[in-house]
Amino acid sequence: MCKVYYPKDNLKNIPDFPHKTIFLAGSIEMGKAEKWQDKMIQMAENDDLIFFNPRRDDWDNSWNTNRYEGNMKQQIDWELYGLQRADVIVMYFDKNTISPITLLELGLHAASGKVILCCPKDYHRKANVDAIAAHYQLESVNTLEELYLAAKYR
């Protein structure tokens, strides 16, 4: 049975994870991106996997995203730690989003050997994502189902 950790959970207090950990990096832009993370988690319902899901149900648009403090500091620190600690990082680029943070995370982790990509043909920076994938020989898939299976079996 899969388990999901969210930004409210302190990952640093968990010394060892008993199963493969997968960070769900990718489009979140509230109101624009589909809730693809929920779909991935549903696919894993009966699998022994652990997900780090940065999407928050309690996101507040009044948070100051220009300052590294308070709730933003907690969110950013949680994501950076989760990305570093994960066994696998899946990245999904929703064609209806810009996803600058996902592009940043791709740049940070492309050389880690942990990244699996799903970037639809209509994503506005597909050429850039494809170039990084080719350069670092990253696994790239076409659907969420393929993304889930690639992460599960890596």
Image (cartoon, rainbow, N blue to C red):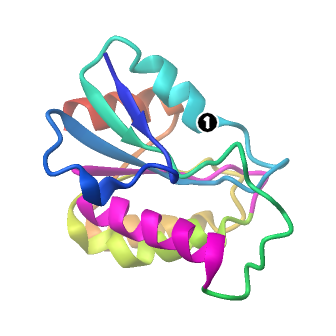
Residue drawn 23% across and 49% down?
Answer: 14
Q: Amino acid at mark 1?
A: Trp
> Is residue 39 found inside the magenta-colored segment of the image?
no
- Label 1 neighbourhood size at 10 Å, few (<14), some (14-19), many (20+)? some
Is 136 drawn above or below residue 3 in the view shown?
below
- Indicate the quadrant where residue 127 lies: bottom right
At which x and y percent is residue 114?
Answer: 25, 57
Residue 18 in the image: x percent, y percent? 14, 34
Quadrant the N terminus occupies: top left
x and y, in percent, of residue 96 in the image:
79, 52
Res 67 quadrant in image: bottom right
Mark 1 sits on what residue? 36
Name above or below for residue 14 compared with residue 103: above
Q: Is residue 43 above or below residue 136?
A: above
On the rendered structure, is 57 left or right of 60? left
Magenta region includes residue 81: yes
- The answer to whether 31 is drawn above or below residue 127 in the figure is above
Image point (47%, 27%), residue name: 41
Secondary structure, mark 1, is helix
Which one is nearer the viewer's eye here, 4 or 124? 4
Total marks in image = 1
Q: Nearer the viewer, residue 13 or 92?
A: 13
Q: Is residue 34 left or right of residue 56?
A: right
Q: Residue 146's x, y, as percent?
A: 42, 30
Identify which residue is drawn at 53% across, 52% down: 54
Query: Which residue extends farthest bottom?
Result: 67
- Residue 103 located left or right of residue 46: right
Which segment did they paint magenta?
69-97
The quarter of the picture where residue 137 lies is bottom left
